[in-house]
Image (cartoon, rainbow, N blue to C red):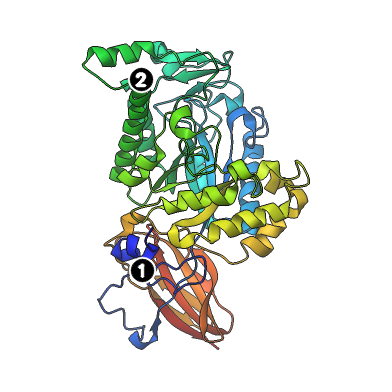
Amino acid sequence: MTAISQRLPVALRSVGSQQGSRPPQAPQDPQAPGDQVDLSQLVDVGHTREMRGAWVATVWNINFPSSPNAPVETQKKELVAMLDRLQKSGFNAMFFHVRPEGDALYKSDLEPFSHYLTGTPGKDPGYDPLQYLVQEAHQRNIEVHAWLNPYRAASAHSTKQVAPHLAVTNPEHVHPYGSVKWMDPGADVVRERLVDVCADLTRRYDIDGIHFDDYFYPYPIEGKDFPDNRTFAAYQAGGGTLSKADWRRENVNRAVRDVNQAVTAEKDHVRFGISPFGIPAPDKPEGISGFNQYEGLSADTQKWMDEGWVDYLAPQLYWRTDQPKQAYGTLINWWADHTSGGRYIFGGNDLTSLGKNSKWNVDEYRKEVALTRAKADQGAQGNLWWNIGPLMENRQNIAKVCGDELYARPALTPPLSTAAGKTVSHPEVKLEGGKVQLNHTDAAPIRAWTLYRKEADKWVLDRIVPGTQTRLELPAGQWAVAAATMHGLESKGVVVDVA
């Protein structure tokens, strides 16, 4: 593969790698700033970007809420506790389960409230969990990515659903399969509902991303084919010539393409990505064997990447570095080497295995992060951790290891490929003593202010401040203040000397 500087769009080629390459320098607005700023005091700033995300699962109440009978105030406290732990441990993103089974952990006219919130499907919990989460997360510089299961309709046959759940409105396209109920990816109404839900979420909430996991067609049960003969027969009757396996993959491809288009049309700064099973396809990579996403779940991950239908892939690499048939290092290298178009790979790590045996220890996760960072120039720029539970427990001191070591320095997430061609102007800064007033003249809102401190002739990122905060106080020293856009571009820094 070519170097990342050759693959990225022009506007993004200055983004630094995990290995301390030249700091990113965002495109600049050529217009002169306000009178209070001396142009000679603008400096290039930048830092190593990295996605640092943790999944919060709501299905079966794995992570949230602790009980479907928990009162509103308890649920809110649980969300805040998770955000506080992520912030203290150096994370910058939460992947929050908003649609575990064709339902909603937010106010929706398209799908009913999840029974995981109240114990009763469709019952209003008395607040909007997603709205509350986004508000609290952004105050802590933590992104919120809305995580959806595209096709699971119920996690158990006994789960009752209410309108407008698809199991009620279109039961002919919801099938029992194993212990679950599954929506048929070959049905137009199923795909259209998924697209509408993603567009609605993007439009109404200030989320930072839309995220799918590995569940497309369900994990196969030996000797039992998924019951989609009706939709396949309709496809053939309409002149379709693909094999059933290829037809299934094309159904998934259409959904991924359409969701990407819908999300981008609403807000092109909302990142859309997928966490596929860790082995992409048969015999890929060489020397790796086992169940694969392409055949087993009818998902062509490389096509999504090459067509630009996703902003990133986060393969679930839930194996140790010393497992030869599914070695973490071999797999992260392959995934990183197959990025394109300025898009990314975020390695998926199984934190729930921490302490399962002597080999699943903190050192194992240190190795996995290091292997991911070693491929930063090829696009591997971060990790997603399954799931937040061990962090909340601080199992084997993992929360402190993250905060003090792995994620000791703050970081913005990597810029999106949709930032190509966009610009960002530097902030307007007024200083009175150590008090700073910030303003930004661009029409588009900014995500954050980045504050750099001068240390030994280098500008080192000291903190990230929410873009909604326009006043702050700085201690004595030389500082540079920059603006970061919703797409992840960073302006030049305005030098501020505080006596």
Closest to the observer, 81 or 20: 20
Give the x, y percent position of residue 203: 35, 41
Q: What element carries label 2?
A: helix
User: Which label lies toward us, 1 or 2?
Assistant: 2
Which numbered disc, 1 or 2, marks the residue that appears first in the sequence?
2
Give the x, y percent position of residue 84: 64, 53
Report the residue marked by disc 2.
Answer: 244
Task: Name the residue located 62 percent from the left edge and 45 percent from the top edge.
Answer: 324
Q: What element carries label 1?
A: loop
Q: Is residue 266 something one can see in this rendering?
A: yes
Q: How crowded is mark 1: few (under 14 residues within 10 Å), some or many (20 or more)?
A: some
Q: What is the number of the mark on residue 334?
A: none
Report the residue marked by disc 1.
Answer: 440
Q: Is residue 297 something one can see in this rendering?
A: no
Image-quadrant location for residue 300: top left
| Amino acid type indicated by mark 1 | His
Task: Name the residue located 47 percent from the left edge and 41 percent from the top edge.
Answer: 284
Please state, as top left, top right, bottom left or bottom right, where the N terminus lies in the image.
bottom left
Give the x, y percent position of residue 271: 40, 48
